[in-house]
Image: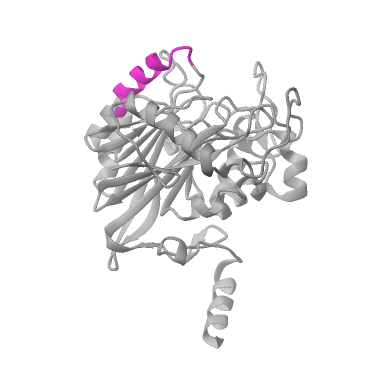
């Protein structure tokens, strides 16, 4: 006990305050975050690495009173244990974290979170977040700079945006110990595709240029044990089939270049999973947290893919209730047609894991979405599985 206390005191003296520890019993590893430092890499037995991803996290100043009162950690109370169970957890951050900057001209609904969201993301268990998203520049360069600073302070890797365009294109590297003696790194890249004609702007984001993406993946895969790629496709389109058709060209090319999982995120869109060359392509994870608005898809799934020695072993599909439509569970939401939530449906006002009949119904819906992409989903004990 004395040795343990002395070790903790030494760590605090060396570089900061111990703020977060993943539960070793959750998934056979532990990680300590100390003000942007990782004292121990994730340890994975049997060469297995699990990767979990959630969709857009979009927060505005309307949520500031809640953050100041309860902390941004309240967003993840119902899912933190699940997020922490993965070796690599990643999300799409669709808002800056700052108190600086002014809304850009012409943006009808600008989004910006109060400080504290970065710490909440770290404590929830996220390792890296994509900033190559539609609303990340709503408040300009100062807000982006603050976002990157806060994320890095809590050792959450920002990807797809940087202090300049070249930095934005660099991969984020998350250290991980594969087995007992073989350390390695997981590489994460993120890109934003505004529309078919826009290639570059002055914003320091990584734009989805075909040749640059594939070349970056080829380089990353020479050093990484796994390569994860986000591609955010901006606004929702009227035709889901058309959107997936365009995304498929890019996604297949990224897999061919060496990516192990491709996440094709699109605003307010929920799609299935395709297996291409034995690697998963997720065609949009929908909104995970969407400010005070009703979500178009309140029943979604979170995929958790497990790789063994670089080969996909399985994908667990966890049904999630993000927000029951027309229920006033958040400040400022419409109350038309409201009813009180049932305890079995929601445990708090933000995303929670579904159980019972609602879980099965959600998985059956996702089973159909995946079937359209020729992917078979098995449903067992309130979970979906792709094997």
Q: Residue furthest front?
A: 357
Residue 356 screen position, x and y as percent: 52, 43
Front-most of residues 201 and 311: 311
Residue drawn at (21%, 34%) of the image = 277
Q: Quadrant of the C terminus?
A: top left
Does residue 374 sit above or below 162 in this rendering? Answer: above
Residue at far bottom of view: 2
Q: Is residue 25 visible?
A: yes
Question: How is the model colour-coded?
Answer: one colour
Q: Picture coordinates of residue 53 (x, y %)? A: 45, 42
Residue 291 is situated, as x and y percent measured from the top left of the image, at 66, 33
Point 40% across, 28% down: residue = 283
Query: Which of the 4 image quadrants contains residue 135?
Result: top right
Tell me which residue sits at (74%, 33%) in the image.
62
Please give left or right for residue 55 compared with residue 137 in the image.
Answer: left
As for residue 181 lying within the magenta part, the answer is: no
Instruction: Please provide the residue range marked out in magenta.
Output: 237-251
Of the 4 image quadrants, the one containing the N terminus is bottom right
Q: Would residue 92 be seen by someone viewing this image from the given angle?
A: no
Instruction: Pinpoint residue 34: horizontal percent, then vertical percent.
Output: 55, 63
Dominant secondary-structure state across the stretch colored magenta: helix
Report the front residue among 323 and 355. 355
Q: Is residue 239 magenta?
A: yes
């Amino acid at each position: 006990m004395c040795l343990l206390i002395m070790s903790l005191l030494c760590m605090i003296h060396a570089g900061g305050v111990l703020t977060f520890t993943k539960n070793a019993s959750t998934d056979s590893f532990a990680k300590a975050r100390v003000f942007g430092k990782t004292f121990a890499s994730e340890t994975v037995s049997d060469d297995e690495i699990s990767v979990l991803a959630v969709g857009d996290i979009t927060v505005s100043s309307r949520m500031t009173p809640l953050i100041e009162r309860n902390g941004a950690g309240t967003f993840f109370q119902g899912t933190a244990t699940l997020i922490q169970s993965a070796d690599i957890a990643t999300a799409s951050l669709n808002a800056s974290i700052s108190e600086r900057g002014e809304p850009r001209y012409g943006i009808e609904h600008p989004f910006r979170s109060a400080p504290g969201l970065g710490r909440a993301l770290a404590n929830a268990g996220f390792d890296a977040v994509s900033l190559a998203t539609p609303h990340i520049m709503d408040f300009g360069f100062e807000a982006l700079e603050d976002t990157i600073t806060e994320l890095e302070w809590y050792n959450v890797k920002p990807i797809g945006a940087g202090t300049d365009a070249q930095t934005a294109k660099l991969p984020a590297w998350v250290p991980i110990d594969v087995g007992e003696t073989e350390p390695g790194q997981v590489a994460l890249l993120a890109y934003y595709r505004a529309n078919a004609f826009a290639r570059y702007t002055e914003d320091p984001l990584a734009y989805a240029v075909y040749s640059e993406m594939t070349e970056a993946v080829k380089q990353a895969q020479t050093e990484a044990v796994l390569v994860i790629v986000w591609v955010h496709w901006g606004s929702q389109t009227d035709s889901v089939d058309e959107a997936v058709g365009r995304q498929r060209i890019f996604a297949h090319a990224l897999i061919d270049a060496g990516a192990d999982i491709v996440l094709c995120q699109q605003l307010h869109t929920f799609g299935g999973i395709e297996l291409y060359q034995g690697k998963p392509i997720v065609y949009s994870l929908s909104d995970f947290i969407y400010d005070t608005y009703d979500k178009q898809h309140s029943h979604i799934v979170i995929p958790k893919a497990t790789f063994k020695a670089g080969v996909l072993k399985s994908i667990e599909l966890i049904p999630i209730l993000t927000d029951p439509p027309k229920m006033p569970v958040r400040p400022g939401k419409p109350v038309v047609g409201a009813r009180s939530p049932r305890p079995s449906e929601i445990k708090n006002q933000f995303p929670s894991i579904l159980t019972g009949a609602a879980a099965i119904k959600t998985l059956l819906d996702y089973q159909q979405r995946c079937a359209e992409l020729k992917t078979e989903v098995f449903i067992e004990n309130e979970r979906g599985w792709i094997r």
